[in-house]
Amino acid sequence: METSSSPSSSSSSSSSFAITSTHTTYTSTSSGGGGGVHIPVEIVSEEEMAFIEAALASTRPFLASSACPSSSSRFALFSSLTSILPCSSVPPTSPGPRSFATSSDIEDTVPPTSPGSRSFATSSGIEDIVPPRSSLLDQFRSKRGLSVTDFTSTEWCEKQMEFLLHWGKPKRTEAMKAGSDRHSQLEKEVSEKIELHIKTIEDSWAIRLMNFIVGTNHLLFEGITRELPVVGVIEGVWMVGVIDEIRISRDGGAGLPLLVDTKTRLKATVPSAAQKRNGRLQLMCYKFLWDNLVTNTFPTEHFFRRFELNRQYTLTGDIKKYIDSFGLDLKYRKLRLWLFVVLLFVIPFIYCLQTLDDVLSHFRYTSSLLSQSDEQLLLRYELQSDQSLLEEYYFPYDSNWLKTQINRGLEFWLGHREASFVSEDEKWKCQFCDFVSDCPISVNSSRDRTRSK
């Protein structure tokens, strides 16, 4: 699920800050009066040794230098990690490694196999689009960028989106609350929420970036992560999102991350074509943002400039405390795996994360170790009453279709044209719109019906 509150730099706010941790303690004990130290002996299984050898072998090419790993080295590392993941993609029964996620991170409610074939204007080597002052993007999203939810809501009905921006959101329905509760329940399977007080926009972004870092580590070692924040540039415009779920499985596949979104339904019916289309747009946006992060250089200077961030901002005490605890308490189920993660991910970065710029550097490094996501995407539909599965809908990523949808949405947000109405065959959407009594298309329809009588 995605949320849209964005703390300002001047006001204090509270955010749900989630952690999953394994409370495993490794200790040494002193013997009798001799002052000696008893060191427990553990037998390394063949599976664990294979993991260690594969991990070390795949990391040698880039551990020897300070440069970012190459694409081939990155994929070798990712393949080594995923090759020993559990075959099942369901959450582990015991808590996983420590990870961070927030329920109100970035938004309200996420390419082709070869990076070179991508037809989008991505974050690499481009300047931000400066929206006209009269545009909706400038009026309502100048401080935080567009969200994936902004695009999906626009695709659903541009006129409804315009009403929402000018008049605010209507009261949440019971169905909406049930959907949010289900997402929270799924998130709790892999994380535990902790409340943190966020005082500045820099602290907020530091948490979001750490959420991505820890969430992707959880994905590599447990085969699943949820509520993962992503950010990037698409067609010159900054976009943010929170991926509902990412899985990795060895079952007959390439071990690539599979992006998943779970939606709940009030009745035991399959979704309409319009609802599925909207869901496809959402997941394709997530895939684009994920793939762009792991295959392109993150536009650091554009990022700080666009969101008006102080890169040398020193993180506040609470934020620094939890970032430090990530390094100190990162204990996976096997001590050897913990040591590997500490050596590879933690020591080079965690204890020097003092500023927002430090966190972003760690974020970029983590992204460089990841692989592009699977070309197949998955929409899951559940019944709200008992969470029974109604349908699992797999579909392929289509970069051309996504580009068309994004460009059409940007025409609306950048003020290049007026908001459009739903098509004739999708006017049934108006029955569920809170602004129907004020909508010109509804008023005109009512007048036409009156005249025909």
Image (spheres, rainbow, N blue to C red):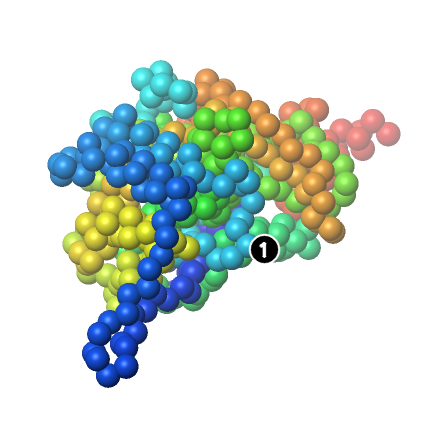
Is residue 340 in view from this perspective?
Answer: yes
Q: Residue at x 33, y 60 (%)?
A: 41
Whole-percent x, y for residue 66 in the image: 13, 38
Whole-percent x, y for residue 296 in the image: 28, 29
Q: Is residue 365 left or right of residue 101?
A: left
Residue lying at the far right of the rendered structure? 453
Q: Residue at x 65, y 33 (%)?
A: 392
Q: Which residue is mark 1?
A: 185
Residue 75 figure quarter: top left
- Report the front residue among 30 and 19: 30
- Report the front residue among 172 and 245: 245
Q: Residue at x 69, y 48 (%)?
A: 387
Q: Secondary structure at mark 1?
A: helix
Task: Tell me which amino acid carries mark 1.
Answer: Gln
Locate the C terminus and report the quarter of the image it occupies.
top right
- 134 in relation to 236, above or below: below
Residue lying at the far top of the rendered structure? 117
Is residue 18 in view from this perspective?
Answer: no
Label 1, residues with CA under 10 Å away: few <14, some 14-19, many ≥20: few
- 322 in relation to 290, above or below: below
Whole-percent x, y for residue 403 in the image: 44, 22
Whole-percent x, y for residue 110 in the image: 45, 38
Q: Residue at x 45, y 54 (%)?
A: 96
Q: Is residue 21 left or right of residue 57?
A: right
- Report the front residue among 260 and 236: 260
Residue 255 figure quarter: top left
